[in-house]
Image (cartoon, grey):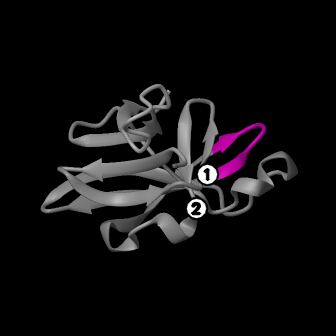
Amino acid sequence: MAPTAIAKVNGTVIAESALYEKVEGNVYFPPAAIDYAYLTPSKTTTHCAWKGQASYYNIVVDGTTIEDGAWYYPNPTDKFLHCKDFVSFCTYAPLMLVMRRVPLRFHKNKPDMSITTIAE
């Protein structure tokens, strides 16, 4: 079983995938793994010298809004092109959780056992 990354707000899954990129401690989910029903475009942009200009989404789940809680790079630099349009989520907001489920391999009688760890 491959490690799976998951992003939740108030217990609602907004992204989940075994295919993701981990960059500078952030988990980046591919576009197909995102439930865009919970994201609304933000006007905020920031610039990273090696990734390029980031655009942001507000996250809205059950009346809770996390402003600029997700970001992506629509036109990344060549070094970050493999993550074009991948979405990452803030981990500092209350009620927001991004984690990875990592399989345990040490128990011969339970090969599918897994634990959940916060993304590092």
User: Is residue 20 in the magenta section?
Assistant: no
Real-space Cα distance between discs 2 and 1?
15 Å
Identity of the residue drawn at 40% across and 50% down? 6
**Point 61% across, 51% down: residue:** 54
Counting from the top left corner in percent of width and height, residue 40 is at: 37, 68
* In the foreground, 23 or 45: 23
Q: Residue 98, located in which quarter of the rendered image?
A: top left
Q: Amino acid at mark 2?
A: Pro
SS at circle 2: loop
What residue range appears in magenta? 47-53
| The residue positioned farthest toward the bottom in the image shown | 37
Residue 96, image x and y in percent? 28, 42
Query: Of the residues tagged 2 and 1, which is closer to the observer?
Result: 2
Q: Is residue 82 above or below residue 51?
A: below
Q: Residue at the location (76% across, 37% down)? A: 49
**Quick one: label 2 or label 1, which is nearer the N terminus?**
2
Q: Which residue position is annotated with label 2?
A: 30
Is residue 24 depicted above or below 7 in this figure?
A: above
Horizontal and vertical percent for residue 10? 17, 50
In which quadrant of the rendered view does residue 108 lie?
top left
Question: Which residue: 25% across, 50% down?
Answer: 9
Q: Are marks 2 and 1 in contact (CB under 8 Å)?
A: no
* Front in this rendered view, residue 76 or 28: 28
Frontmost residue, 105 versus 52 = 105
Q: Which mark is residue 54?
A: 1
Q: Residues within 10 Å of mark 1 (few under 14, many from 20)?
A: some
Eyeballing the image, is 76 above or below 49? below
* Secondary structure found at label 1: strand
Q: Amino acid at mark 1?
A: Ala
Please provide percent x and percent y for residue 22: 61, 39
Residue 5 vs 30, above or below: the answer is above
User: Could you say which disc has been placed on residue 34 in the image?
Assistant: none
